[in-house]
Amino acid sequence: MLGLNKKDATLLLLVAILALCAPFILNPFPEGSALAQFNAGYPDLMQRFVIFGIFAIGFNILFGLTGYLSFGHAAFLGVGSYSAVWMFKLLSMNVIPAIILSMIVSGLFAVVIGFVSLRRSGIYFSILTLAFAQMSFNLAYSVLTPITNGETGLQLTLNDPRILGESATADGSIPVTNLFGLEMRSTFQMDVGAWLFQFNVGYYLCAFIMLLAFYLSLRIFRSPFGMMLRAVKSNQQRMRYTGLNPRPYTLAAFVISGMYAGLAGGLMASMDPLAGAERMQWTASGEVVLMTILGGAGTLIGPVLGAGFIKYFENIFSKINDNVLHGWFSFMPDGLEDFVVGIVHPFIGKGWHLTLGILFMLVVIFLPGGLVEGGQRIARALRKDKSDDKSNAKSNPAE
Amino acid sequence: MGILEVKGVNKRFGGLQALGNVNLSVRENTVHAIIGPNGAGKSTLLNCLVGKLIPDTGSVMFDGNSVLGRQPHEINQMGISRVFQTPEIFGDLTVMENMMIPIFAKRDGAFRMHAVGNMMSEKDIVEAAEKMLVDMNMADKRNMHTASMSRGDKRRLEIGMCLAQEPRLLLLDEPTAGMARADTNNTIDLLKQIKAERDITIAIIEHDMHVVFSLADRITVLAQGTPLVEDDPQNIKGNPKVREAYLGESA
């Protein structure tokens, strides 16, 4: 199917089903229950899941296949966002031209940054990309204010020309992003008993693009080009003496992953039309590295899982505060309750980074292949149980 | 006129004259061994042939074209393949994938964006790789990851990868260094078989005299960066100059 073997087609189908049913899957707890806290099925967060999924899928093409660890990918994310917002300001509120422009511009940036950075490998490459990203961040923050609107961030105004659209709607407000008239923010709500499921146009557009991005990365992984990228990671010396030039291969991978990042940035701006310099900061670059490693670098599905995992923590754990904790532990005697809340306190709310950090360390130490390796181990253990049963059944009569 | 002509090559590293006026002519379809004591400049010479080093003066012609100033991958595309002292293979990939990469390089050149096709559906490449694995007696290891193979197997795979490109000149840099006796003998047999079955010129740098005298048609002895003699194997054995270079003047 679609030029994929059975295993890959199954994987793609699985991702498609998960993306399609996300509003149900992420909302397992009824509204108003104590656990509704853990529901993630609201449009804003679901959009972020898939957008960062795209970002991480693209990053994985570079890092997972060639082993080149870029610490500056957020620069492309930011460039993508700025390009998209400019498109909304100048052309129209349709997201398609914005997304296309964000990919083109970030691709051009990637050619320049990649051309220079890829002259070195290993830690030097990482530092070069980091330097470029920080330069971009600082430029966006200060010198390039006419383009980026500096600290405030780039926003839409009523005075924007929007040649193919309208500067302001009939009632005098800023128009919203749309796909040929279909508004990104429009959400269909479905009440089923105590549950409230939300189906958001923006989310489904992002999910559809994420599926395309995932499919393309599947094809790249299985292609001769993908094999050459793995050869780059494995042994560049042998590659050169086999008549292959590693440089254009790594540059191509760098540009592709930069365009993925630009696409993610463009989608972010399409969901919420503003762009700020902080999107390019090194912490944002570090985040995608964490996502990829946490999920499993070099695996197909890993980066998507990692992105979902981290974004879930960021949004759900950070919202738990002391009041919620007191609610949970209210069954305990007063002194004990305060004590337990005191212990849990550093790990929640603003302390979610601590929880994430500990989880990250545990994963890297015990599951070097990331969450995917964890899944594989569980699957293997289950299969082993089954085959043990079989062999026992066979050997029993002989005894 | 040989397929590889080295003329008047000099290479200096600071105060050290690594190669001094080296002349070498490798005739087509022969096995030419380059021997010499440690520090004689054998590896430096080899690196000058494959584009890793550029000689200070002199010329290196392969089949009538100069290789000087070209990148290693360009020299490979001209038809020179190199086997390293420690086997250089793609450790993270399977044996089959290792074998396919050189065949892709031969067919598609140094770079080609081949990003959506499936590599296993490239029939001609898969077939050529499978045939080479059979020739190398490694078909049963097809799906093995190369990192877990023995040194002898890695060497065999590396030689197979070089042969898969059908090079006109195969350069071997101490192919049996650090090998157990049995692996060394296997490698000698493999090289003898290659010499018998293929139209290929082989230049070999080697320490082990057993290997050299089992394979070579012609031998060049290097000492202190200069060729001492170039002769047939039977004349090299008794040559007093060679003994002196290897054992010192007192011998």
Image (tube, rainbow, N blue to C red):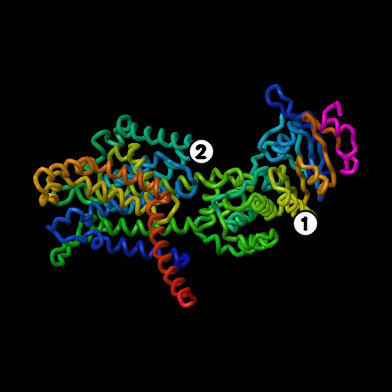
Q: Amino acid at mark 1?
A: Gln
Question: Which of the two marks, 1 or 2, is nearer to us in this view?
Answer: 1
Residue A310 in the image, given as x and y percentages of width and height: 30, 48
Residue linked to disc 1: B193
- Tell me if residue A152 comes above or below residue B89 in the rendering: above
Residue B96 location (% of width, % of height):
59, 58
Q: Is residue B218 above or below residue A215?
A: above
**Badge 1: chain ID:** B
Residue A288: horizontal and vertical position, in percent?
A: 36, 45
Membership of A44 in magenta stretch: no
Query: Residue farthest to the top?
Result: B15
Q: Which residue is denoted by mark 2 in the rendering?
A: A121
* Chain under callout 2: A
Residue lying furthest front: A399
- Residue located 68% across and 23% down the image: B14
| Residue B6 or residue B95, whichever sits in front | B95
Say whether marks 1 and 2 touch (CB < 8 Å).
Answer: no
Give the residue furthest to the bottom. A397
Q: Nearer the viewer, residue A335 or B41?
A: A335
At 68% across and 53% down in the image, what residue appears? Answer: B156
Viewer-proximal residue, A195 or A343?
A343
The residue lying furthest to the left in this view is A334
Label 2 crowding class (10 Å Cα cut-off): few <14, some 14-19, many 20+?
some
Determine the CA span between mark 1 and mark 2. Answer: 40 Å
Residue drawn at point x = 61 percent, y = 62 percent? B126
Q: Secondary structure at mark 1?
A: helix
Query: Is residue A387 in sight in this rendering?
Result: yes
Along the line of sight, the residue nearer the viewer: A284 or A94: A284
Quadrant in which the N terminus of chain A is drawn: bottom left
Q: Position of residue A322 (x, y in %)?
A: 14, 44
Residues shaded magenta: B230-251
A167 relative to A131, above or below: below
